């Protein structure tokens, strides 16, 4: 049929034929239907993942951008004339091991599904232990006379570990809430769903810590 | 027309508090945002009037104002510190708390689920949380006027050392701390909103609503939200560092040898330029966060009044993407005079001029949409056209500013002030008004007064040009921005009296908005009853009952069969074919 008022240009037709837009522009089909946790039958065009999961990824994207901002500030400031490298508090290795082990426990528990609560409890406890270890690292530095304003490297160390610690604390609280849920229905779908979201966040926070270690002491 | 029965229709809450105050309904939240923005606009506008009063007649005394602002206007003469606080807070309130809240969060929340055929946002609770995070942000920003030293005075850009050294100017004290706190809450709220918008658009569309059948306003919201999610976090990082520079003794942005309050500050090695980079990495995309939804509204307001499809839908979508990508890498054009390697400046200049290409495509599509139209000059159409005019005028000035060679001459003059007011002030404001006149009947079931609307438009449009086009010429004449009086400068003697003209035009502009306010509240109670689809438009929100009930669609969610711009389809029974009309009735063109 001829389009009214010549609404489509030749360029547009070419672009449409090129199917630059892939699946997004395709006519709807029932293949896209999904059965997520939020009742996908009304929305056949959605993403292949539930909204909660996608929202979490977006959130992790913003956290990534937050630390990208810190990183760029770090790199610029590092080039300044007064930069002095900080001695690495040895306890950081222990803390790193604790946080990674916590991720492993969570993943094992998630896969086994047996004695789920115990695995989550273990992971949560290790997360809290990590925070305690970070506080100890701060204390050791202070004992050496290295404070927040001492030099730019120490400023970044306290601030980056602090901001990361807040994110870990958020993860611990989320794990506790899943734990409370698991107490009510241990084998329920809701628990598994929440736990899977929590695990994504928890592994992200662990990976973020490795990244920060790299930035702070290797870069 | 209808698909299956609803699967997740929530019970409508019955208590007043859950229904209207702590509501999770996107429509209530949208209106909450809109009304909050309106309140903040009153404050921001009043600040602008005070600024113009000072610039127009810098040597006059205003004893009445001395009573209102005993500190800022002691003896009836404006204190320079107070002037700095005024421009800082005017910018901050207008950009973040009026345009962002009203246009993006307000219209976005109200219309997004309605236009894509969803019952609500993907995360209704997060949506409520996002609104109730921005309320304390507003309170903190407003409260900062009343603390010791007054509100922040380092500009909406909060450049250190003014923003980092507590004793720099009176506003650098508690006022600046509150500013940072308010912005942090705003960013947290806007991030929650952005997550919700993107997820909802990608995941909650109804059957048949493919991406290429979305109204362009939704596309602009999508790109704007993604930009916000990417650009705001680095500013958060910078703000955290700034807080520690202020209160923790660190030196991220503060160099050595700063002398304030009769002593040398202990900071050393920091770089104020670092803040500028981190700030404008947000600051520039933020411009597009505001202007893209405004263009989206302009694009979507045209078809119902031209009775023909929008021109170049796909190219507009691709251009939006191009603008989104380019806007992330051109922040340096705000810093051409801050000191940068000329090659870097060249990169930013080329990137900026590259943005004019997709912007010009969108501008072209807007104008081409008028070709062969049966134009009906109702109020929303006037505002959409005005928005396009501003986009053209402001964009033209942008070419001069995006080029380092001419920007170095024009930087920090009123040319810049005129330019950005056209873009993030004018385009967005007219879209905000146009959208209000257009969707008011859906929101409240009544029409706004057409006559008052037209008076409002013409006064706004003409006085806006009088203010900000004149400022372009003041800038060309060398008048610097941020100065609180020009009486002492010989080289400005020839043009400084123009400021009185600009001020009078600004007062007309301000007064015209009172007409809008009156129209809004009068029509709320006395406006003519609106039918379900008073503009004979095609998009989904007009299929919903007026005003839309909780859950939007009653029993069944509508199913979409066509793109949103099927106007004057040959052979169709009406000159508009709503998106829900099945192919058996009117052939599907796309």
Image (cartoon, coloured by chain):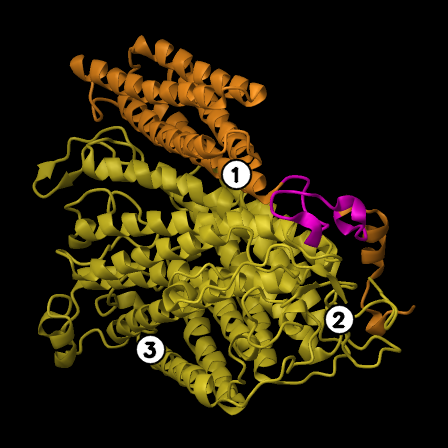
Name the tint of chain A in the rendering: orange
Q: Return the residue nearer the eye: B182 or B487.
A: B182
- Marks 2 and 1: which is nearer the front? 1
Whether residue B419 can be seen here: no
Q: Quadrant of the C terminus of chain B?
A: bottom right
Q: In the image as oriented, which residue stretches furthest toward the front?
A: A184
Residue B111 colored in magenta in the image:
no
Q: Position of residue B475 (x, y in %)?
A: 40, 65
Q: Identify the residue at horizontal 67%, vertical 85% (top origin).
A: B376
Crowd class of label 2 (few under 14; some 14 to 19; many from 20; radius 10 Å): many
Q: Return the residue nearer the eye: A180 or B113.
A: A180
Rendered view: B489 above or below B159: below
Q: Position of residue B39 (x, y in %)?
A: 35, 70
| Residue at image mark 3 | B503
Residues rendered magenta in the picture: A24-49
| Residue at image mark 2 | B309
Q: Which chain is yellow?
A: B
| Residue at image mark 1 | A56
Rendered view: A134 above or below B225: above
Q: Quadrant of the N terminus of chain B?
A: bottom right
Crowd class of label 3 (few under 14; some 14 to 19; many from 20; radius 10 Å): many
Q: Position of residue B122 (x, y in %)?
A: 56, 51
**Left or right: B56 as drawn, with respect to B117:** left
């Amino acid at each position: 049929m001829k389009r009214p008022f010549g609404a489509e240009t030749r360029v547009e037709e070419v672009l449409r034929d090129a199917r630059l837009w892939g699946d997004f522009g395709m006519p709807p089909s029932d293949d896209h239907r999904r059965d997520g946790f939020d009742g996908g039958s009304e929305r056949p065009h959605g993403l292949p993942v539930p909204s909660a999961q996608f929202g979490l990824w977006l959130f992790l994207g913003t956290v990534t951008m937050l630390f990208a901002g810190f990183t760029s500030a770090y790199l610029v400031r590092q080039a300044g004339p007064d930069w002095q490298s900080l001695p690495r508090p040895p306890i950081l290795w222990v803390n790193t091991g604790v946080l990674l082990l916590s991720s492993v426990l969570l993943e094992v528990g998630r896969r086994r599904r047996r004695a789920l609560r115990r695995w989550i409890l273990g992971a949560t406890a290790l997360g809290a232990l990590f925070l305690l270890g970070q506080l100890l690292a701060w204390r050791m530095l202070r004992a050496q006379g290295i404070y927040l304003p001492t030099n730019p490297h120490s400023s970044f160390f306290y601030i980056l570990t602090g901001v990361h610690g807040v994110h870990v604390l958020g993860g611990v609280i989320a794990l506790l809430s899943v734990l409370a849920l698991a107490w009510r229905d241990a084998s329920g779908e809701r628990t598994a769903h929440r736990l899977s979201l929590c695990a994504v966040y928890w592994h992200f926070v662990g990976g973020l810590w490795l990244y920060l270690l790299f930035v702070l002491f290797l870069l | 027309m209808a698909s299956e029965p609803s699967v997740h229709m929530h019970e409508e809450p019955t208590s007043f508090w859950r229904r209207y105050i702590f509501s999770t309904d996107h429509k209530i939240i949208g209106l909450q945002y809109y009304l909050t923005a309106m309140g903040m606009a009153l404050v921001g506008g009043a600040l602008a009037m005070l600024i113009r009063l000072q610039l127009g007649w810098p040597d006059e005394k205003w004893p009445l104002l001395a009573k209102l602002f005993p500190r800022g206007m002691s003896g009836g003469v404006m204190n320079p510190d107070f002037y700095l606080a005024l421009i800082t807070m005017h910018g901050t309130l207008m950009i973040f708390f009026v345009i962002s809240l009203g246009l993006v969060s307000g219209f976005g929340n109200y219309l997004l689920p309605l236009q894509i055929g969803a019952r609500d946002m993907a995360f209704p609770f997060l949506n409520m949380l996002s609104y109730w995070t921005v309320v304390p942000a507003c309170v903190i920003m407003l409260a900062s006027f009343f603390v010791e030293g007054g509100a922040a005075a380092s500009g909406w850009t909060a450049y250190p050392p003014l923003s980092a050294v507590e004793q720099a100017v009176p506003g650098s004290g508690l006022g600046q701390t509150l500013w940072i706190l308010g912005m942090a809450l705003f960013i947290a709220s806007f991030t929650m909103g952005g997550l919700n918008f993107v997820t909802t658009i990608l995941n909650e569309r109804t059957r048949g609503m493919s991406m290429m059948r979305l109204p362009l306003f939704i596309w602009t919201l999508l790109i704007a939200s993604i930009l916000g999610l990417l650009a705001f976090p680095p500013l958060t990082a910078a703000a955290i560092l700034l807080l520690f520079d202020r209160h923790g003794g660190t030196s991220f942005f503060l160099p050595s040898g700063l002398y304030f309050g009769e002593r040398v500050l202990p900071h050393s090695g920091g770089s104020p330029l670092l803040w500028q980079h981190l700030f404008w990495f947000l600051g520039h995309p933020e411009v597009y966060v505001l202007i893209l939804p405004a263009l989206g509204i302009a694009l979507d307001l045209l078809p119902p009044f031209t009775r023909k499809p929008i021109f170049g839908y796909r190219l507009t979508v691709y251009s939006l993407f191009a603008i989104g990508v380019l806007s992330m890498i051109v922040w340096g054009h705000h810093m051409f005079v801050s000191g940068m390697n000329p090659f870097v400046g060249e990169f930013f200049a080329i990137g900026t001029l590259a943005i004019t290409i997709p912007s010009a495509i969108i501008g072209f599509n807007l104008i081409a949409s008028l070709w062969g139209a049966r134009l009906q000059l109702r109020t929303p159409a006037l505002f959409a056209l005005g928005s396009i005019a501003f986009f053209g005028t402001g964009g033209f000035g942008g070419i001069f500013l995006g080029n380092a060679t001419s920007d170095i001459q024009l930087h920090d003059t009123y040319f810049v002030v005129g330019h950005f007011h056209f873009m993030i002030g004018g385009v967005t404001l007219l879209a905000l008004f146009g959208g209000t006149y257009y969707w008011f009947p859906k929101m409240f079931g009544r029409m706004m007064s057409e006559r008052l609307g037209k008076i409002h438009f013409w006064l706004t449009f003409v006085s806006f040009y009088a203010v900000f086009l004149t400022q372009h010429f003041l800038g060309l004449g060398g008048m610097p921005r941020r100065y609180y009086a020009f009486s002492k400068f010989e080289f400005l003697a020839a043009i400084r009296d123009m400021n009185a003209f600009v001020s009078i035009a600004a007062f007309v502009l301000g007064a015209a908005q009172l007409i809008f306010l009156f129209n809004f509240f009068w029509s709320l109670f006395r406006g003519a009853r609106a039918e379900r689809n008073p503009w004979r438009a095609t998009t989904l929100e007009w299929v919903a009952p007026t005003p839309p009930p909780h859950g939007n669609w009653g029993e069944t969610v509508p199913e979409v069969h066509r793109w949103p711009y099927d106007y004057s389809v040959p052979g169709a029974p009406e000159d508009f074919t709503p998106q829900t009309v099945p192919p058996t009735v009117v052939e599907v063109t796309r």
